[in-house]
Image (tube, grey):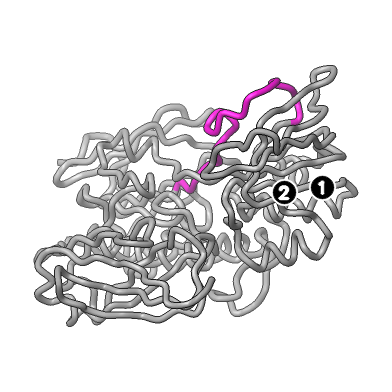
Amino acid sequence: MRGAGVKHYDVIVIGGGPAGLAAAVSACDKGAGSVLVIERDRVVGGILNQCIHNGFGLHYFKEELTGPEYAGRFAEMVRNTRAEVVTDTMVLDIRASADERVVSCISAEEGYREYGAGAVVLCMGCRERTRGAIAIPGDRPAGVLTAGTAQRYVNIEGYMIGRRIVILGSGDIGLIMARRMTLEGAKVLACVELCPYSNGLNRNIVQCLNDYGIPLYLAHTITGITAENGRVASVTVSKVDGGRPIPGTEFTIDCDTVLLSVGLIPENELTRGAGIEIDRRTNGPVVYEDMMTMTPGVFACGNVVHVHDLVDFVTAEAMKAGAAAAEFAAGKRVEGEVIEVRGGDGVNYTVPQRIRPGNAGRAAEIFFRTNRPRGESVIKVTSGDRKIASFRREHMAPGEMEKIIVPAVLLAGASGSIEVSVETTGEA
């Protein structure tokens, strides 16, 4: 039963970033009579608002856009639908029952409110790992920032964060900030990466480091930070073997700023609080092929499920989630066989983790990341001793998300589970 005095929507979307905007548009297109988007920032657009570089939209819009341009197009698309958008509003929790979902939120203007929903779509995005997550020893001075925080300070707030910069980690945000700070007149002295390979897209290695002569130290890490007058003065960098610093390999770089680009984590406090099953490999919710979580009526998409490398892929996933949420709110329920998807040799994770062949249409899309750079490889999909499908790749890397499409007819009789694995046949 719907709570007395609680305003009800067919679909509530939590988060007004690229995933949330696309999910709202899709839900409206699929026939949802009422859609509400709740965003905690002052404006919609999410992280794209601070990503002023180009390279967005090549897949979805077939042209190259900046982050704000991409977000602006979707904001305009939402304005042309029946969806309502509330900003400066923080969602506190989600309560889900068999026939209703209730979203509690708070804002300075409206105070505490509760909304009912036929379906909820989680689009909270992700957050950065901090220094505390990786336990760098040494002083705790000013000048140590995550790359995304630095990006916001420079691109939105207009602050110059430092002049001599070392970047720890080669994630895409860190690589992009290496170029950005160089263009702002800073000297980026080094990008230091713990792994023996970069975790960013190859195009960003070329365009953001190589083109500007910024050295990349692979299999190295920062093992100490020293300060003078409360500000970063230098860092100690060491070579590593298996992630452990090698004694005697230390060298010092004098700098005033350290940027951390050491990974992203799905923003899932709300998800956990709602009791939704989490995949320990992705740190995001376990989902079906239509992006519904294991809690009926609650869907999730974008970086809150698994960290994407391109926003165009976030959009496609969110469109799927929004459409499925609208159908669920309209009373459509999916029943039938469920197949578990597992990651095998060479695979870090798979999304979705569950597939219902009867709901997958003619084919099921499976996303995953490999655990290391690879040359020519074969992706295998198996069920027990039976090979279901195989796919060839000339190159694979952890920084690039992979997608395979498995015809639904091949999933029939999969004995309850399938496994995706990678076998390398050539040099990386």
Residue nearer the viewer, 122 or 59: 59
**Residue 236 left/right relative to 119:** right
Q: Can residue 82 be seen?
A: no
Q: Is residue 177 above or below residue 334?
A: above
Q: Can residue 396 be seen?
A: yes
Quarter of the image for residue 131 reads: top right
Tell me the element at label 2.
Answer: strand
Tell me the element at label 1.
Answer: strand
Q: Position of residue 251 (x, y in %)?
A: 77, 37
Q: Position of residue 153 (x, y in %)?
A: 74, 40
Which quadrant is the C terminus positioned in? bottom right
Q: Which mark is residue 256?
A: none
Q: Is 153 included in the stretch rendered in magenta?
A: no
Q: Which residues are magenta?
A: 124-143
**Residue lying farthest to the top in this orientation:** 229
Quarter of the image for residue 289 reads: bottom left
Q: Which residue is tagged 1? A: 188
**Residue 11 left/right relative to 155:** left
Q: Residue at x 24, y 57 (%)?
A: 329
Q: Are marks 1 and 2 in contact (CB under 8 Å)?
A: yes
**Residue 183 left/right relative to 377:** right
Q: Is residue 383 above or below residue 121?
A: below
Q: Residue at x 49, y 36 (%)?
A: 89
Q: Which residue is tagged 2? A: 191
Q: Residue at x 33, y 77 (%)?
A: 405
Q: Position of residue 58 (x, y in %)?
A: 60, 75
Which quadrant is the N terminus positioned in? top left
| Main secondary-structure element of the magenta-colored stretch | loop
**Residue 43 left/right relative to 210:** left
Identified by mark 1, the residue type is Val
Identified by mark 2, the residue type is Cys
For disc 2, the neighbor class at 10 Å (few under 14, some 14 to 19, many from 20) is many
